[in-house]
Amino acid sequence: MPYKETYPSVLLTDAVEAIGSLPGVGRRSALRLALHLLRQPAENVHHFTEAINQLRDGVHYCRHCHMIADGDECAICADHRRDHRTICVVESVRDVMSIEATGQYHGVYHVLGGIISPIAGIGPSDLSIKELTERVFGLENPQEAELILALSGDVEGETTAFYIYRQIETSHIKVTSLARGLGFGDDLEYADSLTLGRSITNRQIFNP
Amino acid sequence: MPYKETYPSVLLTDAVEAIGSLPGVGRRSALRLALHLLRQPAENVHHFTEAINQLRDGVHYCRHCHMIADGDECAICADHRRDHRTICVVESVRDVMSIEATGQYHGVYHVLGGIISPIAGIGPSDLSIKELTERVFGLENPQEAELILALSGDVEGETTAFYIYRQIETSHIKVTSLARGLGFGDDLEYADSLTLGRSITNRQIFNP
């Protein structure tokens, strides 16, 4: 009788299946983590599960930008020192965190909550695009404001960017996208030819 | 202001810290998993945390061998077709699962729940060694039974094996340990010299 797929306890089987449902966690890692949790004091395990339940049940999203927040307005939108007329459109919460980590951006955000992907069954109405459109058209003098489309460079990202552009075009807001080219410190020898080609086409004035 | 170590929500911070406390899960993976859980339906997340809580709160250990079980006796100890006079001593639940997966062993087990390690502050009384001793001395005709010390080959494993041997020596039970040598299919060129040396010393009759 092969024992490989069976576990000595129903509870362990259930826990391994639950942990193994996380992305990037295989059954072996799931078993390792389940047995680790079993060795911890019960209060630690309860604290662990409680933190996850509270996140899922208690999280708020900013009513302006849809970023995760503790109340109905995030710390960035509440910050009056930031430029509220520059809106950076991103796919996810993680993108906001990545851009904030650079310390180079002082505008605000709009989190779409995903990207248009017909294959994954995600259409414009599943994202906060309507809210973005309302936000842009609600700006005073939108032609003096800026919308940065900070989406990924793949087909889905470009489709989404184009869709958004068509929605807000008539507001005459200035629309920009992220600079693309060789990374700083990148070696020409190892650059992919698409990036290298575009870096030549979009070459910039040398400014030492 | 560096944003790298801060999260947009206290609940997210708590969840990332809880998930990041798991072994082998860094802060980046913890954030990824937290945001994944946030995107799941609430009932899936509750099922996930409930499975972990039930494992921690509801798990039983076999009263004979200390293996994880659903009741007070595990499926292996309850199986009368198995040889209850051959006891395989292992460090952990995972070791039982690994040996069971081979399909080559038909005896029973004794799970120590760890290994003697002065550095980690684990002594004999933290393990189920006393229960093992009682079990061995409780056997009828122990000199006709067998105790397999299936512990790891490092210092802690050998220390633990030697300690157990001294405890049960006077019972005259037959004590064996796992065969050690080159792995099946191993190439001599890549074998470490300790293993290769012991494989020569402990050479076996050629039995094609």
Image: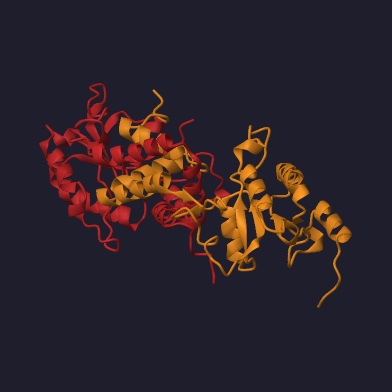
Chain colours: A red, B orange
Q: Is residue A179 visible?
A: no
The quadrant where residue B185 appears: bottom right
Front residue of B17/A110: it is B17
Front residue of A75/B194: it is: B194
Q: Which image quadrant: the N terminus of chain B?
A: top left
Q: How many marks?
A: 0
Tell me where residue B89 appears, x and y as whole percent: 66, 53
The x, y position of residue A42, in whole percent, is: 42, 38
| B163, A43: nearer the viewer | B163
Q: Residue at x 26, y 55 (%)?
A: A116
Q: Is residue A8 above or below residue A129?
A: below
B4 left or right, relative to B66: left
Furthest-right residue in this view: B201
For the question of whether residue B99 can be seen, the reply is yes
Quadrant of the image occupied by residue A96? top left
Position of A174 relative to B40 (above/below) = above
For image coordinates 75% across by 51% down, the residue present is B171
- Front residue of B119/B88: it is B88
In the displayed structure, A142 sits above or below A196; it is above
Q: Residue furthest front?
A: B140
Residue B77, position in %: x, y?
55, 60
Position of the C terminus of chain B by quadrant: bottom right
Residue in the image at 53% along x and 51% along y: B63
Residue sticking out furthest to the bottom: B208
In this rendering, would B33 be left or right of B205?
A: left
Q: Position of residue B190 (x, y in %)?
A: 78, 58
